[in-house]
Image: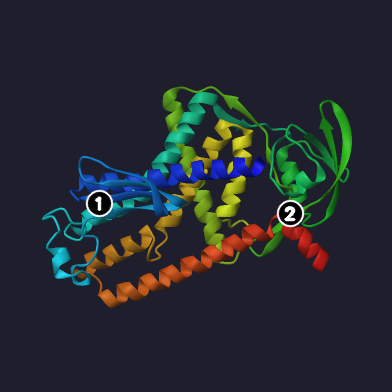
């Protein structure tokens, strides 16, 4: 049942993210006068499709790992046969629009993801209140597969000391654990009014070339009621903080100042989706908001094939006054596809290597 829940939650989460992203492209294309031929959720063979009054075909496909919007005349004129060009609708092709219009269409996808995050965060803050961290070292969430979960720590546990050192605030917990990577620790906790001691072996990751300890817990929060306008403002601030934090983390990974263990792919997203779905609707909505920011940032990376790569081509066209040579675009696109394929394989391996089964097998091998 857990696996079924994970898969179902994964499909819902990814479906929402992809739909909103592609809807951004679709609405911008319609706004700029481009005819949209197909709007597809998923890849491969469709199991449901319909045609709207404008002639756009809407499809649901069996492989739910993305989607696309096919715009009329998206291909370069030299890449299609004359009989195909003869069917193009005058003034409604993508390539026939100005550089600015094409840039708006491409940029609308990531923009829609950031807007979705803002709306979801604002809705959460308006419905449940704005979260304010509890000053005491009370555990709010426990990461699946982390050191804390393996040791038996639970949400609402209050950590009183680590190896005899008193812990008053959550910052004390972070400081002590960070200075103890991959070390056995004796943690004194209070659970439901009863004191007990747990043995924990901390995890670790590399930050700025230094190995720091990890426990795999977050601080408990309290919720403060706010007005609708304050909820919108708080949603915008939260979206900005997640964007800046994610961009900084990606920058640290690229420059080698941070390890790659935090990079995850479809398997990790599916696991997180199931865990957050089990925690409740609010948790799942929060996850969708965070992943929406991640998807928006990912698509803005200037790699051909991604939206950021298309924007880079358009910037070059705007500066040069003409499109980049077809051969340069083709080779860049192939390189981008190869890079994304390698990244997909890497993050999938990263996901598998962090599963309990994989760690058990490697422990047998030694």
Q: Which mark is residue 53?
A: none
Q: At numbered mark 2, what does the secondary structure look like: helix, strand or loop?
A: helix
346 and 99: which is toward the camera: 346
Q: Residues within 10 Å of mark 1 (few under 14, many from 20)?
A: some
Query: What colour scheme does the image use?
Result: rainbow
123 sits left or right of 357 in the view: left
Between disc 1 and disc 2, the foreground one is 1
Task: Count up the numbered dots.
Answer: 2
For the point 11% across and 55% down, which residue is it? 90
CB-based contact (under 8 Å), mark 1 and mark 2? no
94 sits left or right of 240 in the view: left
Q: Is residue 260 above or below residue 19?
A: below
Q: Residues within 10 Å of mark 2 (few under 14, many from 20)?
A: few
Of mark 1 and mark 2, the one earlier in the sequence is 1
Instruction: Point out residue 334 in the picture as x, y percentages from the top left corner.
Output: 39, 72
Instruction: Point out residue 255 in the picture as x, y percentages from the top left corner.
Output: 55, 66
For the point 43% across and 52% down, which residue is it? 66
Instruction: Point out residue 136 in the picture as x, y percentages from the top left corner.
Output: 73, 33
| Image quarter of residue 140 | top right
Q: At numbered mark 1, what does the secondary structure look like: helix, strand or loop?
A: strand
Q: Quadrant of the C terminus?
A: bottom right
Residue 11 visible, this orientation: yes
Give the distance between the C-alpha atoms of the residues marked 1 and 2, in whole angstroms. 45 Å
For the point 72% across and 46% down, which residue is it? 174
Q: Quadrant of the N terminus?
A: top right
Q: Which mark is residue 37?
A: 1
Instruction: Point out residue 166 in the picture as x, y percentages from the top left corner.
Output: 83, 39
Which residue bears the numbered disc 2?
356
For the point 29% across and 55% down, which residue is it? 70
83 and 318: which is toward the camera: 83
């Amino acid at each position: 049942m857990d696996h079924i829940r994970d898969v179902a939650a994964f499909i819902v989460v990814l479906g929402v993210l992809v739909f909103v992203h592609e809807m951004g492209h679709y609405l911008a294309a319609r706004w700029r006068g481009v005819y949209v031929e197909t709007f597809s959720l998923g890849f491969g063979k469709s199991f449901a499709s319909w045609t709207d009054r404008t002639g756009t075909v809407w499809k649901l496909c069996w492989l739910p790992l993305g989607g696309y919007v096919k715009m009329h005349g998206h291909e370069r004129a030299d890449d299609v046969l004359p009989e195909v060009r003869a069917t193009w609708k005058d003034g409604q092709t993508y390539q026939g629009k100005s550089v600015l219009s094409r840039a708006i269409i491409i940029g609308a996808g990531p923009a829609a993801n950031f807007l979705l995050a803002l709306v979801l965060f604002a809705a959460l803050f308006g419905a449940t209140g704005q979260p304010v961290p509890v000053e005491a070292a009370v555990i709010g969430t426990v990461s699946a597969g982390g050191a804390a979960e393996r040791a038996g720590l639970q949400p609402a546990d209050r950590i009183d000391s680590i190896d005899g050192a008193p812990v008053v605030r959550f910052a004390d917990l972070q400081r002590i654990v960070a200075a103890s990577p991959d070390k056995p620790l004796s943690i004194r906790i209070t659970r439901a009014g009863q004191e007990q001691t747990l043995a924990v072996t901390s995890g670790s990751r590399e930050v700025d070339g230094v190995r720091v300890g990890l426990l795999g817990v977050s601080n408990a929060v309290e919720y403060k009621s706010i007005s609708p306008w304050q909820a919108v403002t708080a949603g915008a601030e939260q979206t900005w903080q997640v964007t800046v934090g994610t961009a900084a983390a990606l920058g640290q990974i690229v420059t080698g100042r941070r390890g790659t263990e935090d990079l995850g792919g479809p398997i990790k997203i599916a696991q997180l989706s199931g865990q957050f779905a089990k925690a409740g609707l609010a948790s799942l909505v929060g996850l969708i908001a965070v992943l929406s920011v991640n998807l928006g940032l990912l698509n803005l990376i200037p790699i051909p094939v991604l939206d950021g790569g298309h924007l880079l081509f358009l910037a070059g066209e705007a500066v040069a006054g003409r499109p980049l040579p077809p051969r340069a675009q083709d080779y860049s696109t192939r390189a981008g596809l190869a890079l994304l394929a390698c990244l997909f394989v890497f993050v999938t391996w990263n996901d598998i290597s962090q599963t309990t089964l994989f760690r058990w097998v490697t422990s047998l091998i030694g």
